[in-house]
Image (spheres, rainbow, N blue to C red):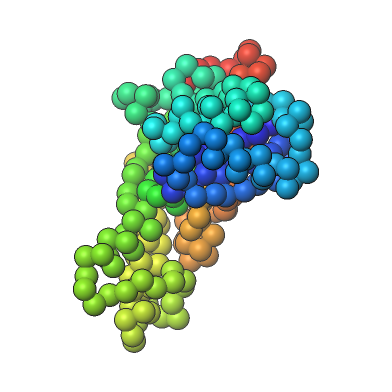
Amino acid sequence: MLLAIDVGNTHTVLGLFEGDTLRRRWRIVTEHSRTADEYSVVLWNLTRMGGVEAGQIQGIIVSNVVPPLQAVVEAMCTETFGQSPLVVGPGIRTGMPILYDNPREVGADRIVNAVAAYERNQDTSIVVDFGTATTFDVVSKRGEYLGGVIAPGVGISLDALFSRTAKLHAVELIRPPKVIGRNTVNSIQSGVYFGYVAMVDGMVRRIQDELGEAAKVTATGGFGELIAGESETIDDVNEFLTLEGLRLIFERNREGTGHGRS
């Protein structure tokens, strides 16, 4: 089995693959203060609950956007499974040319998402990832990573709104009944929900106009399903797109031939 680990700023997502099938998946809070021992306990319990013994893990791949946790994650893998993980970063074989001005600046998760989306579509693709930040990543028809857009995430925007205004309080983010709110809760929900839908649709259209062609748009991340329900430009939703991309990159590095490097 392959263990794929996606360490994000807010959550860490883990997946167990048997071949190309995602058998189990978990989402835990990313705790910057946890030690390798503490993460090892969490990982050990999760895999055991999933009916997996340490010896069944034949490979590990990690995507991490929290640099201070890199040593912790690598130590966790070594302590729990006795093997070092393959880490997505400069020099790893992705099969996708990176046309960013400085490829080292691109978050590992963004490249992984792009690889997975292009593998699925085999055509011009846009990935909208609703994580701590809302990111748009663009892949050409030829499978090149062209670049993208970074905007504040839904959670960040809500936190800023509540922390900076004395009379507004936290609300559940759901689709409100109408755009024009008749109370404070619905007004906040409308501003955030329909505001992000409009931002996503507007940005996707601008990207497609700049490309001069249509693109297949895939949403991922925690709020992907919610926003996609109203969006006019999102074609499909894959909450675990990053895990799929990690599996593909692991296979390409294990094969060792026939793919370019990032």
Residue found at x 58% / y 17%:
259
Give the total number of marks visible in the rendering.
0
**Do we see residue 252 in this rendering?**
no
Please name whichever residue, 260 or 74, is drawn nearer the observer in this view of the structure.
Answer: 74
**Which quadrant holds residue 246?**
top right
Is 87 positioned to the left or the right of 104 in the image?
Answer: right
The quadrant of the image that shows the N terminus is top right
Q: Is residue 18 above or below residue 180?
A: above
Residue found at x 65% / y 23%:
82
Q: Is residue 81 above or below residue 124?
A: above
Q: Position of residue 257 (x, y in %)?
A: 63, 13
Q: Is residue 47 above or below residue 155?
A: above
Residue found at x 37% / y 39%:
148
Q: Position of residue 81 (x, y in %)?
A: 66, 28
Residue found at x 48% / y 58%:
223
Residue placed farthest to the top in the image? Answer: 257
Q: Position of residue 143 (x, y in %)?
A: 51, 29
**Which quadrant holds residue 137?**
top left
Please name whichever residue, 231 or 151, is drawn nearer the observer in this view of the structure.
Answer: 151
Q: Position of residue 96 (x, y in %)?
A: 51, 25
Is 134 positioned to the left or the right of 167 in the image?
Answer: right
Please name whichever residue, 127 or 122, is drawn nearer the observer in this view of the structure.
Answer: 127
Please name whichever residue, 8 or 241, is drawn nearer the observer in this view of the structure.
Answer: 8
**Do we see residue 259 in this rendering?**
yes
